[in-house]
Structure formats: structure tokens, C-alpha cells
Amino acid sequence: MSDNYNLDTRLIHESSDYEEGAVNKPIYQSTSFAYDTAEELSQVFKQQAPGFTYTRINNPTVAAFEERLANLEDGVGAIACSSGMAAIATAILSLVEQGDHIVAGNSLFGGTYSLLQKDLPRWGIDSTFIDTSDLESIDSAINDRTRLVYLESLGNPKLDIPDIKAVSKIAHENNIPLLVDNTFLTPYILQVKEWGADIVIHSTSKYINGSANSIGGIIVDLGTFNWQDGDTSGFDDYYQFGPFAYLAKIRQDLFRNLGVCSSPYNASMNITGLETLAVRMDKHCQNALKLAEFLAEHSLPVKINYPGLATHSQHQLARKQLAGKFGGVLTFGLKDQEQCFKFINSLKLARNLANIGDIRTLVIHPASTIYWRLDEDRQRELGVTPSLVRVSVGIENPDDIIKDFSQALDILN
């Protein structure tokens, strides 16, 4: 489709001409793909000819989803994985080896933090966690073993906002790529390539899917980093692929060997979700702002945290970088964990579960769930306290959401 169309139009119409005039990509629920001759199959395996071999490596339905995300992010290509964490781990591990170092934001999803802080050190890969608003700390944390900078476009659950352009400048001055997890904002709200990112990662289980019916993740190479000249290791066999070197390294190495592929069915569900992303994200943002404003005026909750409020410490940066759409997630504080539990248990409309980006309003107590394995000091570093409630605001009528929160808060008085 022509790039002259706006993104919300491209979300619906960004597709190839499918078989028999179908408007949806068929689900190729097949483990493998046959060829007429041994020579043909050999050429496809060696990437000397286009085609599909085995769904653990590639699949037509999955490829259609990858193509759509790559186009929406203006990237050179994409690789869909079995989950958001699979995408995060694969994207990072493809750039590091024993003895290497990572600089990462200190406001990360619990699974990402655990990977960097607990798992990778066992393989000889260390990480330094920094406040992404402190640019001097980012620069000083980078050393001659650093292979990448990793951050989230909207921190989880701090909801802090890094200045991506400034961080990108630091990373590129040190000849290393910037990886950005854009799950909370999606390409509809924030095009991270425009701000200097090199790799973007999404947990497609969240807003991209939208209906909580399939798990997935995706890695998109934005084509802005020169892998041949970069301070990276293990690329010698892949420089022949030029701007596709990083994606070729992933697909022919870790992706193939770890088996972290997306299923064709999940890829199809995520393609369907993409088509309504724009209208859903607009409603998520509108509802989140209305709920945040209600909570800010209520006498009980404290520390209402939402980038769309003028009281947010980085509201001006959010206005510049996010163009007036501030996402669908907010947090607030109550007295203690007991009061948080009572509030959550009193909700009638909102669902209590571990997810974000669903069309439904979702709540969770992060300290006792997602981050329960971390001690209190580690939790506080990540912005998690026993009194914190996280809300993923759905697309229900905002009056009904507010009514539900109001009655639950009244029970606490």
C-alpha cells in the first residue's frame, strides 16, 4: 500500500493480494512445506531462493504478520516470536556473548528485569540499570564491553518517559544500537524510529492483539544501525546480508535453535488485532485520561501517575514525544497492601489479572504478583511498592469505568 495513506488507514489495508481474492491471510497450519525437487528445497534452505521450509523457521501466515509490522514501523524486516519475553530475550542475546555488558533503564517489566539481572549474569553477561532521565549516568555506564542500550518507551510500572532522541545520540556516539520496547505505546502512538531507535520490540499479546486471545512478540529492525561498522560481535557470517544482517543472524541462529517461533494461528489473531489498533488506542487513551482526572480529584488515592496529567514529572516531554496520546495505563497509591486488596476485590467491572492492553479494564497489585520474587529494595528500584495499583484502562464507556472505581473507593472510606 502507498505510504501516502495515514497509519490508521494502513492498519486496515496494509496487505498483499491473498489467494482467491481473500481479504485475510489464510492460516497455514502446517509444520513443513514440500518442493518438487531436492534442488529447490536446498536453495530455499540456503536462502538462495524465496520460500518456506519449516514453521519453526518461517511460515506464510507468520511472514504476513512480520511484513505488516515492519511496514508500520518503517523497518527493513521483522521476526515474530512465541511471546513478548521470547522476542526480548532473542533480540538481546543475538547481540551479546560471554563477557559483554548491557546498559538498561531501571524501569522495566518484571520479566525483562529478571532476565537481565538474574539470568544473563549466569552466562557471563552483566547489566547496569540507570535512570533514563539521567543522561550523564547513561553515558558513564557505557564501557568498552557494552553492546547495546535497552529501554522501554513508557516504563512499566513507573510510567516514566525516556528522551529517546537523547539516549539514541549517546548510544550511537558509542557505536552501539538502541533497543526500545514499545509495547505500551504501539506504533500508532509512537514511531520510535523517528526518535532514533534502531530495534523496536513489542509484546503483541497486549495492545496489538487487543482481545487477549493469543500470546506473541515481535522484533523489528528499523534499518538505522550499520551492523558492519557497529561495535557488535558474532556478525562475520552475516555481513553478506547487508542491512538484513541482524535479522539474518537471529533467524539462522538463536531463533532457529531455540524454537521461539510464533504459531500461525497466533500470528493470524494478531493480524486481525492490528486492523482495529488505531480506534482502540484512541479510546484507551481517552478513557485513561478521564479516569486519571477522576482519581486526581478523589480524596482517597494518592500519587496518581499518568503522563497525560500536568502533575506528571515528564508531562512536557510526553506532550512532545507522544503527540497528545499518553497511553492506556496508569497507577495510583493507596494506604497499604491490605487496602489495595480490598479495593481490587470490590471492583465489579474491572478484571483482576496479569495483562495490559486488553479491551477490558484490568487491575493488578504488582508487588504481590508480577514482582513478588524480588525483595522490597529491588521492587522500589523498579517503582513498585506495596501500596501501588496498576490499571490498564479498557474501551468500555468511561462513565461505567469511573462508576466502578468510585464505588470501590467508597467502600474504603
Image (cartoon, grey):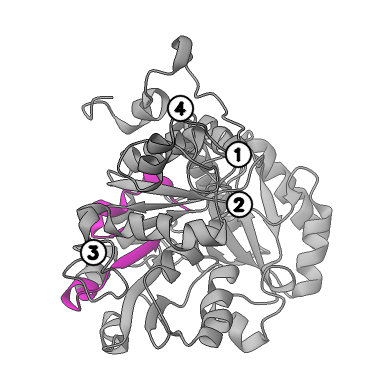
**Callout 3 crowding tier (Cα within 10 Å): few <14, some 14–19, many ≥20:** some
Horizontal side of residue 146 vs 257, given as left or right: left
Residue 356 seen in this snapshot = yes
* Residue most extreme to the front: 38
Q: Which residue is mark 4?
A: 36
Rendered view: 368 above or below 154 = below
Viewer-side residue, 262 vs 334: 262
Figure disc tally? 4
Q: Residue at x 54, y 70 (%)?
A: 112
Q: Residue at x 38, y 37 (%)?
A: 39
Between marks 4 and 1, how big is the CA–CA gap?
A: 17 Å
Which label sits on residue 356?
2
Which label sits on residue 165?
3
Q: Position of residue 139 (x, y in %)?
A: 26, 84
Horizontal side of residue 244 vs 111, given as left or right: left
Q: Is residue 277 magenta?
A: no
Q: Amino acid at mark 1?
A: Thr
Q: Which residue is mark 1?
A: 31
Q: Earlier in the sequence, mark 3 or mark 4?
A: 4
Q: Amino acid at mark 4?
A: Asp
